[in-house]
Amino acid sequence: MGDRFAIEMDGVTKRYPRGITAVADLDLRVPEGEVLGFLGPNGAGKTTTMRMLVGLVRPTSGRIRVLGQPPGTPEQLAQVGALIESPTFYPHLSGLDNLRLAARYAGVPESAAERVLAEVDLAGRARSRFREYSLGMKQRLGVATALLKEPHLLILDEPTNGLDPAGVSEMRELLRSLGRRGHTVLLSSHVLGEVEQVCDRIAVINGGRLVADGTPDELRARLGSGLLVIVADPVDKAVACLRDHDAVSHVDTDEGTIRVTVDPALAAELNRRLVEAGVDVRELRPVRHTLEDAFLELTGAERAGGTDPTSPGEGDK
Ligand SMILES: Nc1ncnc2c1ncn2[C@@H]1O[C@H](COP(=O)(O)OP(=O)(O)OP(=O)(O)O)[C@@H](O)[C@H]1O
């Protein structure tokens, strides 16, 4: 959509008292209509950035414009739906009544409550009490609150946090539908698998700094070449032959399995070379780098200890 930016951040730094620099010299532009995944490990500075965008935190330096306005002005806030801290809902009231109250606070007609409940696919549970909602339904009610004002920009801080796989999948579908309807969305997460399918672009932040910014495909490409896994005999001869090839940037072995960093399109040629060199090739298969590999590489983060169910396998690095 056009060349207008919903979010413009230029050289934004936030230093908290006691010396923590949460955000450092951040440049970020989000065009109108884009769904941007804002990705980073815990403590990377995502929440601080989002809080700055709605005027809850003042930057130490730098320039911020949200929908063309400085953050936190009444005009800006009227056009931004944010889910940054968990909103407070009354447990004994229904989802619908909670939203009607929120609509009143937001100064929009109460009739908006039913519209947004349908948007987050909760119309069927409109009259259930909030306390009877699953965590996923509670999170979707939070998104519904952010939608009440029909905002031009949605800022959602980790809306999938704490959800089970079914909840994540429902939230993902909701976010995808918001994107399809032309909303501009800034969506943070520390789990790549939760955002890569719904975002047009991903900005990766680490230690308060932007370390990468691109479409999922561009980020994947940043990893450079792919990987081939080869089982061959004799191993030493195979390794020597592979190291000889100009296009191969790295070869190592792990318990007899050879890992070759190379464009997987060269698999057939490498196979031919090995056979010509008298090597018996028993297995040769490409391993596609996942975007998660790219993310972990960029952030230097460890694979989360079993809490992030996004990675199909271990040990490909
Ligand atoms: N009010 C505050 N006062 C001092 N330091 C803070 C404050 N809020 C955040 N920080 C620090 O700033 C850094 C960035 O925190 P922030 O919450 O922005 O990161 P995050 O990427 O949202 O992390 P998470 O995914 O864990 O929520 C952290 O080191 C954090 O301890």
Image: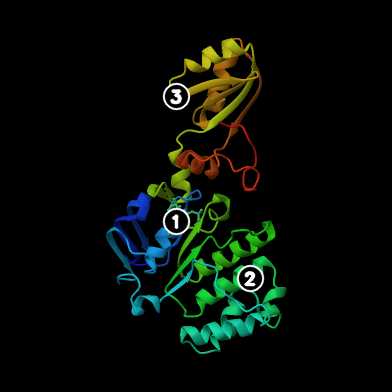
Instruction: Compare marks 3 and 2 and give the one earlier in the sequence.
Output: 2
- Can the viewer see residue 17 in this picture? yes
Rendered image quadrant of residue 94: bottom right
Q: Is mark 1 within 8 Å of ligand 1?
A: yes
**Would you say 209 lies left or right of 109 here?**
left
Instruction: Compare marks 2 and 1 and give the one earlier in the sequence.
Output: 1
Q: Residues within 10 Å of mark 1 (few under 14, many from 20)?
A: many
In the picture of the structure, the residue carrying the numbered disc 3 is: 247
Residue 100, x across and y down, in percent:
57, 86
User: Disc count in the image?
Assistant: 3
Disc 2 and disc 1 in contact, CB within 8 angstroms = no
Q: Amino acid at mark 3?
A: Ala
Residue 269, x across and y down, in percent:
53, 23
The mark found on residue 46 in the picture is 1
Q: Mark 1: which secondary structure?
A: helix
In the picture of the structure, the residue carrying the numbered disc 2 is: 138
- Residue at image coords 70%, 83%: 127
Q: Mark 3: which secondary structure?
A: loop
Question: The C terminus appears in which quarter of the rendering?
Answer: top right
Rendered image quadrant of residue 8: bottom left
Q: Amino acid at mark 1?
A: Lys
Residue 72, x across and y down, in percent:
35, 73
Q: CA distance from mark 2 to mark 1?
A: 22 Å
Q: CA distance from mark 3 to mark 2?
A: 52 Å
